[in-house]
Image (cartoon, rainbow, N blue to C red):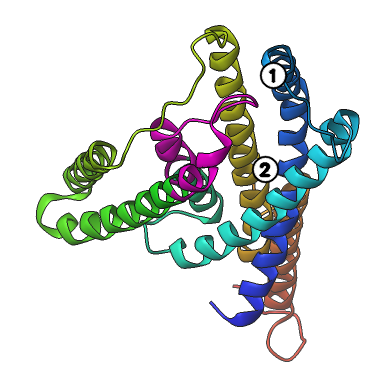
Amino acid sequence: MNSLSVRALLVRGMIAGLAAGALALVVAYLLGEPRVDAAIDFEEAHAHEHGEEVFSRTLQSTGGLATGVLVFGVAVGGIAALAFCVALGRIGRFGPRATAVFVSLGALLTVYVVPFLKYPANPPSVGDPETIGRRTALYFLMIALSVLLAVAAVLLGKRLAPRLGNWNATVAASAAFLVAVGLAYAFLPAVNEVPKDFPAMLLWRFRLAALAIQATLWTGFGLVFGHLAERLLVPGAAARPGSAGTAAGSAERVESAKSAKSTESAQGAQGVDGEPAPAH
């Protein structure tokens, strides 16, 4: 793949990330913000001192949320597009659209779901401010381990495929990935700073909303980027699935064949030098 194709895919990945970010923004506003408001109300009801807000809650839930989600979507879209360039043709005989979907699902699993199961998202008022640096470091360490283990699992599957076959190699590599992730879960320290009187239902719904936001982002990116990548890399992909252009082209080819056959018959009737052919 040349540099022009990589650059074009990078641009399309950022566009797809922006579109997916817009979808995730809707989910975040409808599902996430009500839970954040409820958590803030809980925090204010139990806090003895109230700090002055730098930005109003209205600005945070509108402009701030939109800026954060859209910028994040564009950034991860560009990174995922580069990962797509590396994966295309190397993870099986998949076309651009299927490869984009696999990359998106892999990113959702390794970048969010695996770290989320160890260190789930928490709403405001959950967590000690003095341990935020430690908690952030542990979360990013879990992301790094998850990505590295996923890459190692893919390489293991490719190495085992000639001996075990694609299906058995995939099962073995997946099992190895799960075992390695389980060991990481066991050895990394746990973090549990939820207040005892914090509503369990609110915590559960907030975490489900966070998971829904990420699932919307990566699913939307995979579908949009897959479509854009296929149109770029597969010439005539838009007209292939039984479109009117294909039908018109087929009709034109049939008419051309009929015209050529009629011309050939006329030339045969005239003879070689343009005279009528002798009768037998």
Q: Secondary structure at mark 1?
A: loop
> Judging from the image, what secondary structure is the residue with disc 2 in?
loop
Residue drawn 72% across and 29% down?
A: 28
- What label does residue 47 carry, if any? 1
Depth order, front residue of 160/58:
58
Return the residue at label 2. 242
Q: Quadrant of the C terminus?
A: bottom right
Residue type highlighted by circle 2: Gly
Where residue 193 appears, x then y in whole percent? 47, 26
Chief secondary structure of the magenta portion? helix
> Is 150 on the left or on the right of 54, as rendered?
left
Q: Amino acid at mark 1?
A: Ala
Q: Residue 43, relative to residue 267: is it above or below?
A: above
Give the residue displayed 21% in from the left and 57% down from the top.
156
Indicate which label's residue lies in the foreground, 2 or 1.
Answer: 1
Mark 2 in CB contact with mark 1 (< 8 angstroms)? no
Answer left or right for 271 relative to 210: right
Q: Answer whether residue 130 is visible to the viewer in this image.
A: yes
From the top left corner, tell me how far across and down residue 229 is, in percent: 63, 58
Q: Which mark is residue 219?
A: none
- Sort mark 2 into few (<14), some (14-19) or many (20+) by Cα contacts within 10 Å: few
Residue range (magenta): 109-137
Can residue 231 be seen in this snapshot? no
In the rendered view, would you say 155 is above or below 243? below
